[in-house]
Amino acid sequence: MSGVYVSLQEQESTDATLSLKAMGTQLGINLGISLAVMAGFSLLRPHHTLVYAPKLKFSKPERRPPLMGTEWCAWIKPVLSADDDFLMERIGFDAHHCDWPPAPGLSLLSMSGINAYYDVDAVDATATAMNLAKTDMRWYWSPAGATWLFTLLIGWFLYRASCDYIEMRQRFFHNPPNKLSARSLLISHIPESVRSDEKLKKWMNGLGIQYPVKEAVMGYHSAKLTDLIQEHDEAVRHLETVLSSYLTDGKGVDSRKRPRMRTGGFLCLGGKKVDCIDYYTEQIKDLEKQIKKLRQSSDAKVANYGWVAFDKIVFAHTVDRSLMQQKTIDVRLSPPPSDIIWGNLGMADKTRQTKRWIGRALFWILIFIWMLPVGALSATSNIVNLIRLLPNSEQFINDHGFLMGMVQAYFTPIVMAIFFILLPHLLRFLSKQQGYQTETTLDRKVLSKLYIFFIINNLLVFTLTSMLIGIYGQIRSLVLSGQLSSDFSISNYIVQLAKNITGVSTFWINYVCIKALGLTMEMGQIVPLVMISLRKWITRPSPRELREFAQPPDFNYPLAYNTMLFFFTIALLYGVIAPLVLPFALLFFAISTMVYKYMLMYIYVTKEESGGRMWPVLFQCILTSTILFQVLMIIILNLKGGHTQSYVLIPLPVLTLVYMYFYHVRMKSLGSFLSNTAGGTEVHIKEDLVEEEKDHHHSEKESLGKTFQDPGLTKKLMTPMVHDDVKHLLPQVYRHAVH
């Protein structure tokens, strides 16, 4: 049996040599590409402001980032010198909180993890199935102590970040982006007997609330009108695209064939060919007539929800808190109208709950279905052990080591990244169907689903499959070479299973490197720059498309946070057993901090400000990863024979759960309302009163009736846009009256 372990050690030596060569080559290639991308970014940035700093042009003066010079590294100083107050004022609370609180602790984790690694490695040199009992178990106190240290460090950083979150929420309440919604409450499931503005106001004042309602308005909704407006907007965009493509530079229009399209039919068979311009023009005119008729007929139904406004923000918070404690009606602080998903607002409770459960079932079905391709993908992550399943594999491995190392370094990480591109969009659609009422709520739900999905599929399933394929390939190679009989049992190689968990870390190092390269390419805006250039070169975008190209894009918070959560989890799980992951994770977080800070200051905007509401979800995910790390360490120490040390770690998951619950309750209590609004006592906050006095005149011009209405009832209809240099050709192109 000892000869078998010698053979396994020889295989591990071969694998390590291949992995190190591939890793070194990948690092060299990635570093070269990254330096080239950053050089291109520094060269192009001063000359392409609309791509690399669109917020300098389109932001309001009070939200505009600081100007940058034209020198290559002129962007670094503004990014590094921006403090917290400046960031909250210029980029918002959500963007400011897109920093990674546990990241500063990774340097400490690296030091302690590497120390623990040498201790564990010393045990691995002697810990085989035959002599495990002879191993000095004192070696295992080092990783056990490192696990306690890691947990305490994470708890400390989360404590500090949570205090910052609570302080930031109070600051957000004092100075909200939408004053009217901040002092308003959204009331759901209003009884039919009080579904009018006056009755709603009288009903609310009759509930014994501490402050009188200043204004009340019922909601109205027409699903048909919403669908018609969506169809109208799509038709306008199609017409604009056709006109821009047909008119181009305005030359030779008379001799050019008018664009035609086929309507009806199936798979390009059957149907009827029509003139594109005439078809979309008639469609737009018909939809405008239907929309106008529906708006004038007042067919919009009175919904089961409405809004009430108070004189001050603090009044709204006090009333909301008291009504929530009484549980007499369904009430919440009103989200801004731009954040509301109007189609989900009036959904009945039973319908919403049914959709929630169906959505949960579909989500878990998706997870289990996705295990099959992830399991297949994991086989390519350790192609060496996959090849060992074949006869005469060792000679092939020795002859083609570099090629296999490069496949392991690039192929699987890139395929995995591509594999999950559509996943966030799919999960957002699923969450929307579950009846959530706001876009910011969808962001939090998508983040939770992404985290669960990645932990189960990308981490657990992928790691377990790779580990089992690895040990089976190793032992199968020994069987084929005659060093081991075919009636072996994997259960006899428990120690090797534990060591193969460490071996999977090589893939995650490659994955982290690929993602770090992706971050530098994202900062270089290569994809947007190429896509815009190709669109302008191949086609002629419509004026609306050009305007949208130039606008600062929305930042995808769930995807960015999930990426950081995932790499934090990898660094944490492998921090003791394979600490080589930690320096790479530290490098990734250092790069992501600079890249995201620059992009949020100069490129991306927050679609809807939530005041940092994403942090409680992040808090729970980070602690869940911590519990996974603690459980993994208990299992590994038991597999290696360190039973006493594993027992010392058993209290950690329990203490972490208690800490998670306590701080969840604390953040919910202190981060959901203005401070000192409990108990119905009137509170006068100086900063709040000053801000309200400053915006009093502006707020008087706003009203609930104008602000909180379904866009289907009030939205201005889109009109077709064409380029100025071809407007004179419209009479020749249109066969209808030009408006």
Image: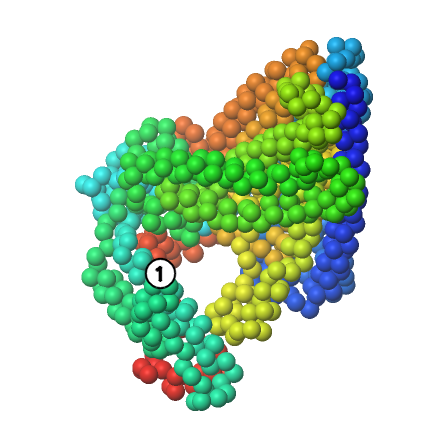
The residue at 74%/51% (across/down) is 30
Given residues 213 and 434, the one toward you in this image is 434
The residue at 21%/58% (across/down) is 298
Badge 1 is on which residue?
230
User: Do we see residue 461 in this rendering?
Assistant: yes
Quadrant of residue 132 within the rendered picture: top right
- In this rendering, the answer to whether 320 lies above or below 290 is above
Quadrant of residue 160 within the rendered picture: top right
- In this rendering, the answer to whether 328 lies above or below 374 is above
Q: Is residue 673 left or right of residue 389?
A: left
Q: Is residue 87 left or right of residue 351?
A: right
> Where the N terminus falls, by quadrant?
top right
Q: Residue 395 placed where, x, y %?
A: 77, 39
Residue type highlighted by circle 1: Gln
The residue at 43%/56% (across/down) is 698
Scheme by which the image is coloured: rainbow
The residue at 26%/44% (across/down) is 304
- In this rendering, the answer to whether 234 lies above or below 203 is below
Q: Residue 230 placed where, x, y %?
A: 35, 60
Given residues 299 and 41, the one toward you in this image is 41
Given residues 62 and 361, the one toward you in this image is 361
Q: Secondary structure at mark 1?
A: helix
User: Do we see residue 463 in this rendering?
Assistant: no
